[in-house]
């Protein structure tokens, strides 16, 4: 051995320090009985590093092992653990090579480390993300001739008899030596000699406990060491047993010689160096360590303990006669992980689908976790590398559609990773090389949020990007993409390679829910309908929903369920009672208001995340505007509650506490995001509702909301009436600002809900039809017309809408009397007038249907609705892209409701016009053929709508125009 190989000779043994100075891999040698840190291993440590071509930190641990030294397995294990958890706490990949009783020392150390870790996690003193436990950092244990069940019966029996006979005679001498040397010569009883007897119950119990811990760690998806055993064929000290595992190897040699190589090419050096090479030169291990820590942190913040799976009580409940892929969270995770490990003949795309709140994000995180722990146990080119990209945090510039690209996403990801983990700044991850040559599983989380945050992009844009990516890496059959998306997205099946690559995370059945969440038994049976049942049968609700005692007497709605669930979360947060503005004590209402404002600050900028300082600054600005707007109502109790809630965010301590203890997840040192999209949408609906209730609607002019938010806001108005004064105020703000979002948001809100409106207020809205810009006019006629046509029993204003709207339909249906020159508006009004005539016995239209044309004279009038005209040029910018996608969604909605046929066909006109003039979003190239091909499901829906036969004529016209466009004849 080179004289300068060992850098230090410490009290715990010999230490070799890597010249790289940033080694995170540690190789630990542990000798056995009668051995020592230098003589036992000789040149092996140096040869291992030479053979693997790396330089890492190495420890040859030393502990008392001679027959006259006072020692035990437990004492040596404590010393080893002290060394590794203090001196080498920064080493994340720890490898052990042990001989004889050294293997027992390491096993005892790991056993104790596991017990401590388990206790810390149970008492919430630590998490897998924050713990430096040696159990979590241990990767491999290579045991050489370790007597797991004890040594040879004859040798150990004889040794025990001799030693126990001699020791009493030597004990006074040992004690004297210890006294004279003041403990420097720690002579005394060597318990290693007695513990090694064959079938010693203590040894058997240690082995049994350790194996059980490995199994528990595997079940809990906890990182844990992989154990290998090497035995000598001529070992007389350790009994030879039959090979029971692929991790057991037998070499030629004796108990002593099997551990000492004669040259650097010996098999024992090759085995150890191959394992060291895997861990020492793989920078991805550090990345995966951080990934697992991040997942553990998010799971803690979101309250996820374990995935929901089947057990003996629930396995057969709700089983479908037709087998589909997926199932419970646990089953879905296991199926996808298995598929990724198997791979295929080409890159594969896998989609995980499910309803809102079923835990899709949890499942994809745990897929990444399982693949990560698998990689730590078996690093190498054949093991899939999980790369988790949180799409909900990505912000795409709006200066061009090309900004959404594979390369942009991964440039963003690398910046995010290095900002989150500065210690990775020096690593060159070489992602492009990984994607082309290694087994890689790219996992996209938060696609739903991304599409909402970026309305100018649609699902087809994502599909196109992923298809180009799989083509780009077509030569790498071990490349996989996993995407999670909410069920109900039209065309989501295109995210998967085949239908067999779609996995559904199913809702729990009521019986499963009661088994897994026993507290729901008292209220679950009172959920009134299937739609609400799907909402509550999710971990998101079941783990937090604790309704008030009088819940049975109140009507259950999605809004009320989400509100009560959030109240429970806030009630458990220890936030209630903190001092806020002017010394006032914060109540649940104040904290809920603060959350409502945070949701608005996210939504108005299409944010996926927000920095705490930015949040506080913008909250102050919004609060001041509200105070000014409500200064005439400042004495109202409701206003005071609202403003106090807003002021909470101006107190830095209160603001941080709210972000840490409610429904947010940290995305960086000083930034957060919502833990689930459902919280954001619910809180936005509350903000929308409060804007209307307090008459402060200026914020309606910032952006359009979505149908889901409108519907939940409508539930907040149940039992209330939108007054004439309120409508007059909103229309006044719109006229003064000329901001079409203000009128458009009110119109869309009333179109998507059954909100009761004062009859005079409805008349004011309808009378303003000629003043609206074309989009708002079309949305009002289409939305109000659908509401009248649906004639729902709970819609108390349906009759007033019909009476106010019908005269206007008669006016606009005739191009000669219409106050606006808009063929689409005339056709839309005519179709609804005829539908009302058939369904409600009202008068038929006085003229024939005003036919829609696709000549340039008509289509150029429609173009400003779906693209931007700048200097005579047609421009497809972010606004026009979002408008086209906004038109496309209601068209697809008609597949589930024929009453939407009139609206859908007139919206479809604008999309075909965009296609004709070449200013269409990519989604139209994907969707129009599916909507207009003969025999498609959409055609069958239109054929079933018989109230207005002209609607089918219009659809046939569209089919003909589309065929000409596809053939290049138009």
Image: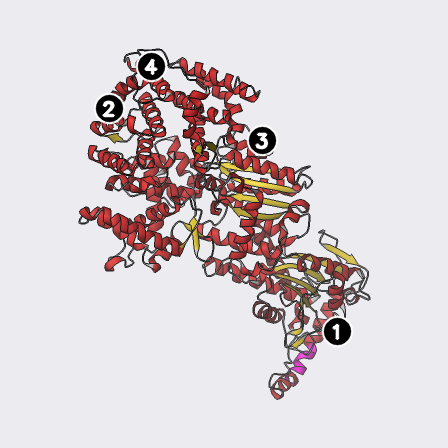
Residue 78: image location, x then y, percent = 58, 70
**How many numbered circles does the render carry?**
4
According to the picture, the residue beneath numbered tag 2 turns out to be 800
Name the element at disc 2. Answer: helix
**Sequence-wise first label, 4 or 1:** 1
Q: Which residue is mark 4?
A: 834
| Neighbour tally class for label 1: few under 14, some 14-19, many 20 plus, Cα within 10 Å | few
Q: How is the image coloured?
A: secondary structure
Residue receiving disc 3: 499
Q: Nearer the viewer, mark 1 or mark 3?
A: 3
Magenta stretch: residue 51 in it? Answer: no
From the viewer's perspective, is residue 941 above or below residue 243? above
Q: Which residue is mark 1?
A: 39
Please tell me whether mark 3 or mark 4 is closer to you in this view.
4
Question: In the image shown, does 547 or 725 lie closer to the viewer?
Answer: 725
The local secondary structure at tag 4 comes to helix
Instruction: Give the extent of the magenta segment.
Output: 165-172
Identify the residue at image location x=53%, y=23%: 929
Marks 1 and 2, how far apart at CA: 97 Å
Query: Closer to the camera, 852 or 339?
Result: 852
- Front residue of this view, candidates 229 and 679: 679
Quick one: label 2, few (<14), some, or many (20+) residues within 10 Å? some
Q: Distance between the Cα atoms at labels 3 and 4?
A: 42 Å
Q: Secondary structure at mark 1?
A: loop
Spatial CA distance of label 2 from label 3 is: 47 Å
- Distance of label 1 from label 3 (alpha carbons): 62 Å
* 751 or 287, nearer to the observer: 751
Decide whether residue 167 is among the magenta residues.
yes
Instruction: Confirm whether residue 439 shows in the render.
Output: yes
């Amino acid at each position: 051995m080179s004289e300068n190989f060992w850098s230090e000779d410490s009290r715990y043994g010999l230490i070799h320090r890597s010249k790289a100075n940033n080694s995170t891999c540690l190789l630990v040698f542990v000798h056995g009985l009668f051995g020592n840190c230098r003589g036992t291993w000789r040149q092996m440590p140096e040869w291992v590093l030479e053979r693997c071509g790396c330089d890492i930190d190495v420890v040859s641990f030393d502990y008392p092992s001679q027959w006259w030294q006072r020692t035990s397995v437990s004492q040596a294990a404590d010393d080893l653990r002290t060394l590794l958890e203090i001196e080498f706490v920064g080493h994340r990949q720890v490898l052990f090579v042990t001989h004889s009783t050294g293997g027992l020392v390491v096993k005892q150390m790991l056993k104790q480390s596991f017990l401590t870790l388990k206790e810390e996690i149970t008492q919430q003193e630590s998490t897998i993300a924050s713990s430096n436990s040696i159990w979590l950092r241990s990767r491999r244990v290579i045991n050489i001739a370790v007597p797991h069940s004890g040594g040879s019966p004859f040798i150990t029996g004889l040794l025990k008899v001799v030693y126990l006979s001699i020791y009493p005679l030597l004990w006074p001498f040992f004690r004297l030596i210890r006294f004279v040397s003041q403990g420097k010569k720690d002579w005394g009883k060597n318990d290693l000699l007695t513990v090694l007897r064959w079938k010693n119950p203590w040894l058997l119990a240690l082995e049994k406990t350790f194996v059980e811990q490995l199994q528990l760690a595997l079940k809990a998806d906890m990182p844990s060491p992989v154990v290998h055993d090497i035995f000598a064929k001529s070992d007389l000290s350790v009994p030879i047993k039959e090979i029971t595992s692929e991790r057991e190897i037998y070499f030629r040699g004796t108990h002593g010689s099997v551990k000492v190589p004669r040259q650097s090419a010996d098999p024992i050096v090759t085995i150890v160096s191959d394992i060291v090479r895997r861990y020492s030169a793989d920078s991805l291990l550090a990345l995966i360590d951080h990934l697992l820590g991040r997942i553990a942190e998010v799971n803690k913040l979101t309250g996820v303990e374990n995935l929901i799976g089947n057990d003996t009580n629930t396995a057969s409940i709700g089983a479908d006669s037709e087998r589909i892929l997926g199932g419970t969270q646990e089953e879905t995770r296991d199926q996808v992980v298995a598929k990724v490990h198997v791979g295929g003949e080409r890159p594969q795309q896998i989609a995980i689908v499910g309803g809102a709140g079923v835990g899709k994000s949890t499942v994809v995180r745990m897929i990444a976790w399982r693949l990560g722990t698998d990689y730590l146990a078996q690093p190498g080119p054949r093991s899939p590398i999980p790369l988790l990209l949180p799409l909900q945090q990505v912000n795409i510039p709006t200066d061009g559609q090309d900004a959404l690209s594979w390369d942009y996403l991964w440039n963003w990801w690398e910046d995010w990773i290095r900002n989150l983990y500065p210690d990775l700044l020096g690593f060159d991850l070489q992602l492009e090389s990984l994607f082309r040559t290694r087994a890689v599983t790219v996992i996209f989380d938060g696609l739903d949020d991304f599409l909402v945050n970026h309305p100018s992009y649609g699902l087809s844009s994502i599909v196109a990007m992923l298809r180009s990516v799989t083509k780009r890496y077509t030569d790498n059959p071990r490349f996989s993409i996993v995407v999670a998306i909410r069920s109900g997205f039209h065309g989501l099946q295109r995210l998967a390679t085949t239908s067999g690559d779609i996995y559904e995370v199913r809702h729990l059945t009521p019986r499963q829910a009661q088994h897994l969440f026993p507290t729901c038994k008292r209220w679950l049976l009172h959920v009134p309908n299937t739609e609400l049942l799907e909402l509550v049968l999710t971990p998101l609700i079941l783990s937090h929903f604790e309704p008030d005692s009088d819940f049975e007497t109140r009507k259950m709605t999605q809004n009320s369920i989400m509100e009560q669930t959030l109240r429970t979360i806030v009630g458990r947060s220890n936030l209630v009672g903190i001092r806020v503005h002017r010394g006032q004590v914060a109540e649940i209402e104040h904290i809920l208001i603060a959350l409502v404002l945070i949701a608005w600050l996210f939504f108005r900028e299409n944010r996926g995340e927000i920095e705490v300082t930015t949040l506080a600054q913008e909250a102050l600005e919004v609060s001041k505007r509200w105070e000014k707007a409500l200064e005439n109502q400042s004495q109202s109790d409701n206003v005071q509650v609202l403003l106090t809630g807003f002021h909470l965010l101006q107190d830095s301590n209160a603001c941080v506490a709210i972000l840490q203890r409610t429904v947010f997840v940290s995305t960086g040192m000083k930034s957060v995001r919502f833990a689930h999209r459902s919280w954001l949408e619910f809180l936005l609906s509350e903000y929308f509702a409060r804007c209307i209730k307090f008459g402060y609607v200026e914020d309606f002019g910032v952006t359009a909301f979505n149908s889901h938010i409108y519907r939940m806001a409508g539930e907040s108005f149940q039992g209330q009436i939108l007054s004439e004064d309120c409508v007059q105020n909103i229309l006044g703000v719109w006229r003064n600002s000329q901001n079409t979002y203000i009128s458009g948001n009110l119109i869309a809100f009333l179109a998507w809900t059954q909100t009761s409106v004062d009859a005079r207020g409805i008349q004011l809205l309808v009378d303003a039809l000629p003043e609206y810009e074309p989009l708002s006019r079309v949305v009002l006629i289409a939305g109000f017309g659908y509401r009248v046509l649906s004639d729902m029993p709970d819609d108390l204003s349906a009759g007033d809408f019909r009476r106010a709207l019908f005269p206007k339909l008669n006016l606009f249906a005739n191009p000669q009397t219409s106050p606006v020159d808009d063929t689409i508006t005339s056709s839309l009004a005519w179709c609804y007038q005829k539908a009302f005539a058939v369904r409600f016995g009202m008068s038929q239209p006085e003229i024939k249907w005003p036919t829609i044309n696709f000549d340039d004279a008509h289509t150029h009038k429609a173009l400003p609705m779906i693209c931007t005209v700048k200097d005579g040029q047609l421009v497809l910018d972010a606004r026009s892209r979002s408008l086209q996608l906004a038109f496309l969604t209601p068209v697809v909605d008609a597949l589930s409701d024929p009453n939407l046929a009139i609206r859908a066909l007139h919206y479809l006109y604008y999309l075909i016009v965009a296609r004709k003039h070449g200013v269409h979003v990519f989604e139209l190239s994907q969707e129009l053929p599916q909507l207009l091909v003969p025999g498609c499901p959409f055609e069958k829906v239109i054929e079933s709508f018989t109230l207005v036969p002209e609607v089918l004529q219009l659809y046939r016209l569209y089919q003909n125009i589309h065929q000409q466009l596809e053939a290049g004849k138009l």
